[in-house]
Image (cartoon, rainbow, N blue to C red):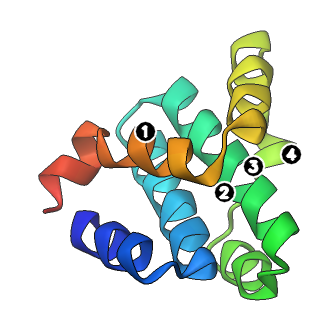
Amino acid sequence: MREGMEIFKDAGDLTGMALLLDDAAAVDLLAGERVRAFRLAGAAAAHIATTGAGLGVIVGTEEGRHWQQDISSDDDRRAWAAGQAMSLANALDYGLADPAVQASA
């Protein structure tokens, strides 16, 4: 996943970057890193919306990811909002620093 993030970042591929942020969020959720997952998911959702990356919505739906519906605590809400406010560059840096992403290198 790390290599993919770096390739999409270097290429300026906004759709690819947003999709991999969402993938990193899903991995974090599985790893029990709920706050980190919702922060990355919020960032991914914001950038999928602003880039018009409809593929991201399709992939998320196919993968059973319904982030906003899964928000169940104040921590989730704060993390989602923080992710929504992140620039794409900041979100990628945050994602690349993710232990789950590091492990997938």
Question: Image height check: is 26 above or below 29?
Answer: below
Question: Pointers 4 and 3 in contact (CB under 8 A)?
Answer: yes
Q: For numbered disc 4, what is the local secondary structure?
A: helix
Horizontal side of 21 relative to 81 (left or right) equals left
Amino acid residing under circle 4? Gln
Classify mark 1: residues with Cα within 10 Å, few (<14), some (14-19) or many (20+). some
Amino acid residing under circle 1? Tyr
The image shows residue 80 at horizontal and vertical percentages of 74, 33
| Residue under pointer 3 | 67
Alpha-carbon distance for marks 3 and 1?
A: 18 Å
The image shows residue 92 at horizontal and vertical percentages of 46, 51
Disc on the earlier residue, 1 or 4: 4
Amino acid residing under circle 3? Trp
Amino acid residing under circle 2? Ala
Alpha-carbon distance for marks 2 and 1?
A: 12 Å
Q: For numbered disc 1, what is the local secondary structure?
A: helix
Q: Nearer the viewer's eye, disc 3 or disc 2?
A: 2
Q: Residue at x 52, y 58 (%)?
A: 21
Q: Quadrant of the C terminus?
A: bottom left
Question: Pointers 4 and 2 in contact (CB under 8 A)?
Answer: no
The image shows residue 48 at horizontal and vertical percentages of 76, 68
| Residue under pointer 1 | 94
Q: Nearer the viewer's eye, disc 4 or disc 2?
A: 2
